[in-house]
Amino acid sequence: MASKAGTITPLKMARKPRVIIIGGGFGGIAAARALRNADAEILLIDRRNHHIFQPLLYQVATSVLSSAEVAAPIRELEVRQKNLSVLLAEVTGANLTERTIDAVAPAGEARRIGFDHLIVATGSIPSYFGHDELVSHAPSLKNLNHAERIRTKILVAFERAAATSDEGERERCMTFVLVGAGATGVELAASLADLAKSTLRRNFRYINPADARIVLLDGADRILPSFSMQASDAVAIRLKKLGVEVVTGVKVETVDENGVVAGGNHISSATVLWTAGVVASPIPRMLGIPTDHAGRALVDPFMRVAPHVFVIGDAASITQGQHPVPGVAQAAIQQGRYVGRLIAKELIGRTVETTFRYFDLGNMAVVGKNYAVLQRGSLHASGILTWLLWAFVHILTLPRLQNRFRVQNQWLWSYLTRQRSSRLIREEPGPT
């Protein structure tokens, strides 16, 4: 019998061991796939019904790709993996001693679900460094809703610039400020510059989109702090060639509907975008386990926080040697595979003594058309060949074959014509 909304329905433990995975991102899906041959019941819980290929979200925000091209339904995993079930729900609590979690489904039905092993792969959320009042004025880029909202703000800004006869307002509408010059900020700024100077060049009769001012701000003394100084300097030069103003060493003081105050200077802008940082999702703190300043669980070398409880990906804090393992997709995938295989071995009574070791495949960032940078240890590369390598790697790692074909075709079309097909302004809900 279905329970009433708000009540808790106990679920009996399955006869087979149950492994619960919270989060359908890179780490969670990698863990699920690593358990495909395990004699266990795998339950994957996520509050969204889709997996997002986050490295390409900025291309959704700048009209290169559509949302469907960078996402895939999580439920398709049930077709391919017979021991896996998917539950669309939000985790609201957990009891590690009793090995249960509480989750609420979309209809409001609450469930208490027992587990034998738990994997937390809930990723990260945008950080406004204690200034959450900035959210309404400076949207971040972490999911499909964010990307579509940013795309709408950008396109509406050009439309408003074309519709006004006030020169000051037109200049404000055509000024775009990005706060945070990490990889996301750099890639978004470069793609926005290409949109303004190439794609929209002949689309307006009374304004010239190429006159748009794009400002990239960061409080650090250089952009791309996770890259070498050499790569950072090369990217800064490239951005300036694209018309992006790079301003470092300044902290943002206020953001409102009129623009940004940074380093004591006011920049009038109708579009401020937040690409400054992230913190772990609230789930690790909800578990009552030790976390670092960013809310990431302090895991042991086996990615474990308690007996049979693991945390991976952006939600985990782990060091290798003297260096922290970075919060990037490749690290989450490697951790997911490791923990999935570890649990599979424990289920058949084998003891795992090998700790997690991160293999760094290198950092990459694309800076507009025909240019990307790669860094792996002392190896540095940049230019069109690196850009082609970036495109090849990203196509191969997209979640479905369908996504790969569609993205490949869209990229080829955009490269040859400079046109972007997903230039849709999202309509707000209202009366029909």
Image (cartoon, rainbow, N blue to C red):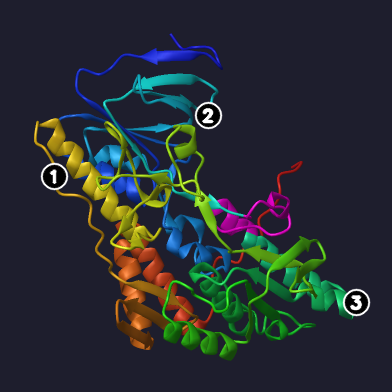
Q: Is residue 117 above or below residue 256?
A: above
Amino acid marked by disc 1 = Glu
Q: Nearer the viewer, mark 1 or mark 3?
A: 1
Quarter of the view holding residue 209: bottom right
Name the residue carrying label 1: 353
Q: Which residue, given by chain and number where applicable, does mark 2 sit on? A: 106
State the residue in front, 60 or 325.
325
Please name the residue shown 47% across and 88% down the image: 234
Q: Position of residue 340 (x, y in %)?
A: 22, 42
Give the secondary structure at mark 2: loop
Local packing at callout 1 (Cα closer than 10 Å; few below 14, some 14-19, many 20+) is: few
- Can residue 371 be seen? no
- Specify which label sits upstream in the sequence, 3 or 2: 2
Q: CA distance from mark 3 to mark 2?
A: 47 Å
Would you say the residues marked 1 and 2 are in contact, meaning their CB atoms lie under 8 Å apart?
no
Q: Position of residue 180 (x, y in %)?
A: 59, 68
Q: How many residues crowd mark 2 within 10 Å: few (<14), some (14–19), many (20+)? A: few
Magenta residues, as a range?
128-149
Residue 218 in view (yes/no) = yes
Above or below 220: residue 30: above
